[in-house]
Image (cartoon, grey):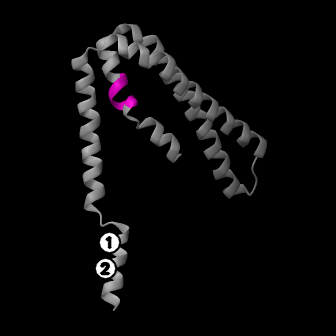
Amino acid sequence: MQFDKFCRNRKIERYLIPAIRTASGEAEALIGELDALSTKAAGFLRFVSDQLAGAFDLGSIKVNEVIHAMESYCDKIVTRFDREEKELLPLARRVFSIEDWFSIAAQFLSEDAVACGRRRALPARGATQSAVMSNSR
């Protein structure tokens, strides 16, 4: 589930695909197919989640069905990533101007700066351990 959440929160999903939709109508069919792959993958993941929840409730699980569903989920995600790389990114290269790419890159960097700021706000693990060690002496 965490991996799937990560996949849905990638920068390509949040910034590049919406920008392509805005810039060109020629991407709609491809983006629709990519979305369909994600929807099918999510369906397999929901099935696995339901099976695992049922295993806790009923004490039984259909292992072969869970394995097949996870394999299907992975197949859909790999297919999506492959199509993004081979079809979506070349389309984006064709559709976007240099200014468009700089605008998208600025969004990427802005998000990175916010994430980096959050990491800096937390004490480093080594620093915390050093503080504990020096306080215990």
**Three-letter amino acid code of the residue under disc 2:** Ala
Mark 2 lies on a secondary structure that is helix
Mark 1 lies on a secondary structure that is helix
As displayed, is residue 106 above or below residue 5?
above
- Mark 1 → mark 2, Cα distance in angstroms: 6 Å
Identify the image quadrant of residue 12.
Answer: top left
- Residue 131: numbered disc: 2
Q: Which residues are magenta?
A: 12-17
Residue 131 shown in magenta: no
Q: Nearer the viewer, residue 52 or 4?
A: 4
Identify the image quadrant of residue 50.
Answer: top right
- Residue 127: numbered disc: 1
Please identify the dominant SS of the magenta region: helix
Measuring from the top left, give residue 108's x and y in whole percent: 29, 35
- Residue 49: numbered disc: none
Compared across the picture, whether 63 is left or right of 75 comes to right
**Three-letter amino acid code of the residue under disc 1:** Ala
